[in-house]
Image (cartoon, rainbow, N blue to C red):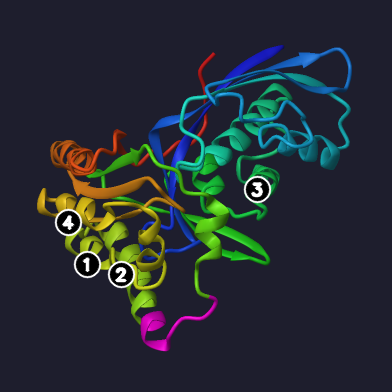
Amino acid sequence: MESIKVFAPATVANVACGFDIFGFAVDAPGDEVIVSKRADNQIIITNITGEEGKLTYDSTKNAVTVPIIKYLTKLGLGHGFDIELHKKMPLGSGLGSSSASSVAGVFAVNELLDKPLSSKELLPFSMEGERIACGSAHADNVAPALLGGFVVVRSYSPLDVFKVKTPDELYVTIVHPDIEVNTKDARHILRNEVSMKNTIAQMGNVAGMIAGLMQSDYDLIASSMVDFIIEPVRAILIPEFWEVKHAALEAGALGCSISGAGPSIFAFSKGRETAEKVAIVMKNSFEKVGIHGISYVSGINQFGPKIIG
């Protein structure tokens, strides 16, 4: 192939109790890239759409191309590529926008070069896109975008991630309100120390979430979706958060929390019908105070990036 078009999915990170260690992929939204071989060894961004002119065309500073450059350098390859980036999701949404770009780019190049590396081996390169975007190479968005499914980041040194089986009827509702939350601000306000009491409670919920997912125990999933550490702090950055969460739970959601750094909010439900109902009430709760938004309903995307052309 001389050219390839790839879609990489949005992701929900933290997943309530699993700050910086949990993340899962969804079917939509996501980013698309078109990567074409060049006759020379340059990496050129030829077109970017859907981001209102906010992203740079400098290939050394864009999350879609930095992983590609790192990948080619590591493998000692002198290939060149033209890259088109089509943002199909909001920037700064808390849905892993930069991760989707990073994954789509390096996955596409790996495919064009006949897959010298496995998807899991692409993870360190994809994480470098996160470093460019937010200053830190976190894997909780990148890993599920690349591998699909519900992913646990067990360790960064050494890097160790694994996937967890999820119930077939587990659906997620995501509402992205039309407000801005800066990722760096959302991290800056977090406390450096937490109490022993909250740490123990959080550890119990992390264990409960994993067991609930693997056993398809929806009651255990619901009771484990409590965040004692991050959510109470970050919620102050999202107007109407507690009202939206209450509305989701009243409509039958298993649990509801902040997606990544926000402002998007996600809720788990058993079954698509409930998830669709939850989407309506969450949007309505925001709109009561004049905040418009976009909603998505999805199962857990088990496949990650895919070739679409």
Q: Verify CB contact (< 8 Å) between mark 1 and mark 4.
A: no
Disc on the earlier residue, 4 or 2: 2
Return the x and y of residue 68 as percentages of the image width and height: 74, 34
* Position of residue 215 in the picture relative to residue 41 (left or right): left
Q: CA distance from mark 3 to mark 2?
A: 28 Å
Q: Residue at x 83, y 42 (%)?
A: 74
Amino acid residing under circle 2: Gly
Q: Label 3: which residue?
A: 127
- SS state under label 2: helix
Q: Label 4: which residue?
A: 246
Disc on the earlier residue, 4 or 3: 3
Q: Residue at x 33, y 48 (%)?
A: 265
Whether residue 89 appears in this view of the structure is yes
Q: CA distance from mark 1 to mark 4?
A: 15 Å
- SS state under label 3: helix
Q: Decide: is 207 above or below 305.
A: below
Q: CA distance from mark 4 to mark 3?
A: 35 Å
Q: CA distance from mark 3 to mark 1?
A: 32 Å
Q: Crowdedness of circle 2 by 10 Å Cα count: few (<14), some, many (20+)?
A: many
Q: Residue at x 64, y 30 (%)?
A: 55
Q: Crowdedness of circle 1 by 10 Å Cα count: few (<14), some, many (20+)?
A: some
Q: Verify CB contact (< 8 Å) between mark 4 and mark 3.
A: no
Q: Label 1: which residue?
A: 223
Q: Nearer the viewer, residue 11 or 187?
A: 187
Q: Which residues are magenta?
A: 192-200
Q: CA distance from mark 4 to mark 2?
A: 22 Å
Disc on the earlier residue, 3 or 2: 3
Q: Verify CB contact (< 8 Å) between mark 1 and mark 2.
A: yes
